[in-house]
Amino acid sequence: MTDNQTPPGWYPDAQGVQRYWDGTEWTEHTSADAASPALVTAYCTNCAALMDPSAPACTACGFGVGTVVNYCRSCGTQASPGQAMCLACGSNLTIYRAEEKSKLVAGLLALLIGGLGIHKFYLGYTNAGVIQIVATIFTCGLAAIIPFIEGIIYLTKTDAEFEAIYVIGTREWF
Ligand SMILES: [Zn+2]
Ligand SMILES: [Zn+2]
């Protein structure tokens, strides 16, 4: 690889290792470096088990990523609820914490003033909220039966179910 016209890219070097060629010379970057970011491990923020960083939920405890942050995601050090930064590695813990949404608040909003779609907005379902308002107006209030049923469904879920389905998940209707 002495041809300076070779465009920058990954090529096998003299040792057969994939190495980054910057267009004029070999760099220190080999495929081992390039692959390592994908292999970075993450810790479950609920039980501190090592997990695949791209997995939506921990295989050890089943908790969805971002539900609770009892442990640092990057180093597994224990953290207290509400702690903003890991004391061991300095990583930001707030980005892994889902915004807390109360089942009770959503349920009561749906039951009491559901026709206004406020419970949808509360859960972050803006489109569904707008649709609910329009539906309520066009049916002269009849569509308010939908949020009434939704409110009952919300309140019969456990907190964990509610969080999994409506806060981490995005089930917009029922
Ligand atoms: Zn876990
Ligand atoms: Zn940490």
Image (cartoon, rainbow, N blue to C red):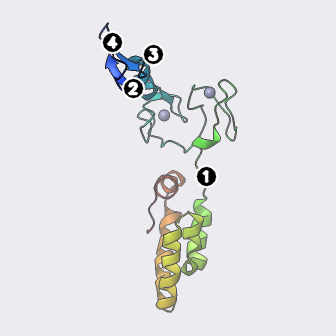
**Which quadrant of the figure contains the C terminus?**
bottom left
Single out the mark in the foreground, 4 or 2: 2
Residue 87 is situated, as x and y percent measured from the top left of the image, at 70, 27
Q: Is mark 4 within 8 Å of ligand 2?
A: no
Percent position (x, y) of residue 126?
53, 69
Mark 2 — residue?
8
Total numbered badges shown on the rendered structure: 4
Residue 55 in the image: above or below residue 10: below
Kind of residue at badge 4: Asp
Mark 3 vs mark 1: in front: 3
Q: Which mark is residue 13?
A: 4
Task: Indicate the quadrant where residue 32 lies.
Answer: top left
Q: Helix, strand or loop at disc 2?
A: loop
Mark closest to the chain's N terminus, 3 or 4:
4
> Residue at coordinates 67% horizontally, 30% vertically from top-left?
86
Q: Which amino acid does the dot numbered 3 rest on?
A: Thr
> Left of 55 or right of it: where is 89?
right
| Of the pair 11 and 85, the residue shown nearer to us | 11
Indicate left or right for 11 with 142 as reference: left
- Residue under the image location 37 percent in, 19 percent down: 4
Mark 3 Cβ and ligand 2 under 8 Å apart: no
What residue is pinned by disc 1? Answer: 99
Q: CA distance from mark 1 to mark 4?
A: 49 Å
Residue that mark 3 sits on = 27
Q: CA distance from mark 3 to mark 1?
A: 44 Å
